Amino acid sequence: MPHKNIAPPNRDVALVELQPGIYLAVACDSAGGIGEKERDVVKVPPYITGRFTCRVTLMELLAIGADPLVLTATICSEPSPTGEGLLKGVMDELCASGFNIPITISTEKNIPTCQTGLGVTAVGLVKEGGLRMGRTEPGDGVYCLGVPKVGNEVSLHDPDIADTGAVRRLLSLPEVHDIIPVGSRGIKGEVEHLARVSELSVRWELCPPVNTKKPAGPSTCVVFTASKLPDIKGPSPVFRLGTLF
């Protein structure tokens, strides 16, 4: 019998039903031209690239209620020093997020490269009853945790940006419904897409407190829906964006 595939319409995660009520969840993220090589556009240590690329995939899985089980790091650069730096970042992000899971690694050993490239894929499992998708209801408020930042604006210890801990805090609150890490299409794109798939409309605040059209780079913020403004512990700011009706 073929597996049942589910493509969540509002996020970068694929779901495959392995057996009734149990789903394989797959999330991925890539980074190119971000590192210390000759033609890299954003100059940061490979370690930072590894941290954030890994973080995005973990946030995507956590946001839908999945538990990560294994991760791959596809390093499009030489094993050393770039590969070592990227891998150290990936492993430290896993540790900081509280995961001790296997990692499969590949590096470029045959061709010299002049730009840093990294792809990270995370695979996990989620039971149907634990799926955090499609929970948004008419009248829910739309909120943003964290500030959208991209490129050279992004730094590892910035208290204004979201991380896996922020997603976990949202998951623990019963009034929170859907959680979506924001990427290149920005807050506005994510919220409007969520509204469409929920068969709802968005009533935006007259003066949104953040730039809703700006890309959020490596998911430096997350949008979420909730029946009321939750009491969220943590350093990242929370903004009300509007209402779904």
Image (spheres, helix red, strand yellow):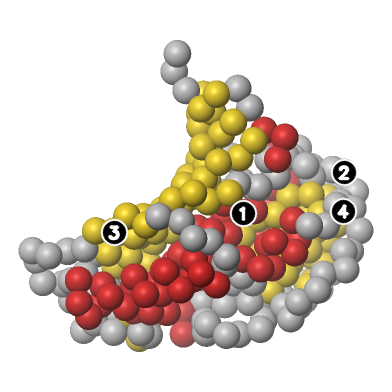
Query: Which residue type carries mark 2?
Result: Pro
Residue 42, percent from left and from top? 37, 82
Residue 31: image quadrant is: bottom left
Which residue is under mark 3?
105
Distance between the Cα atoms at labels 2 and 4? 13 Å
- Residue 41 in which image quadrant: bottom left
| Mark-to-mark CA distance, 4 and 3 | 39 Å
Q: Earlier in the sequence, mark 1 or mark 3?
A: 1
Q: In the rendering, which numbered label is found on residue 187?
A: none
Amino acid type at mark 1: Leu
Q: Nearer the viewer, mark 2 or mark 4?
A: 4
Residues at marks 2 and 1, CA–CA distance in whole angstroms: 24 Å
Residue 36 visible from this viewpoint:
yes
Q: Residue at x 69, y 68 (%)?
A: 166
Q: Earlier in the sequence, mark 2 or mark 1?
A: 1
User: Please, what is the three-letter code of the amino acid marked with disc 3?
Assistant: Ile
Q: Earlier in the sequence, mark 2 or mark 4?
A: 2
Q: Position of residue 212 (x, y in %)?
A: 67, 68
Q: Are marks 4 and 3 in contact (CB under 8 Å)?
A: no
Q: Identify the secondary structure beneath mark 1.
A: helix
Q: Which residue is mark 4?
A: 175
Q: Which mark is residue 138?
A: 2
Which residue is identified by label 1?
62
Q: Locate residue 59 relative to residue 243 in the image: left or right.
A: left
**How many discs appear?**
4
Q: In this rendering, would 180 be left or right of 6?
A: right
How far separated are the C-alphas under marks 1 and 4? 17 Å
Q: Position of residue 164 (x, y in %)?
A: 61, 66
Tell me the amino acid under the disc marked 4.
Answer: Glu
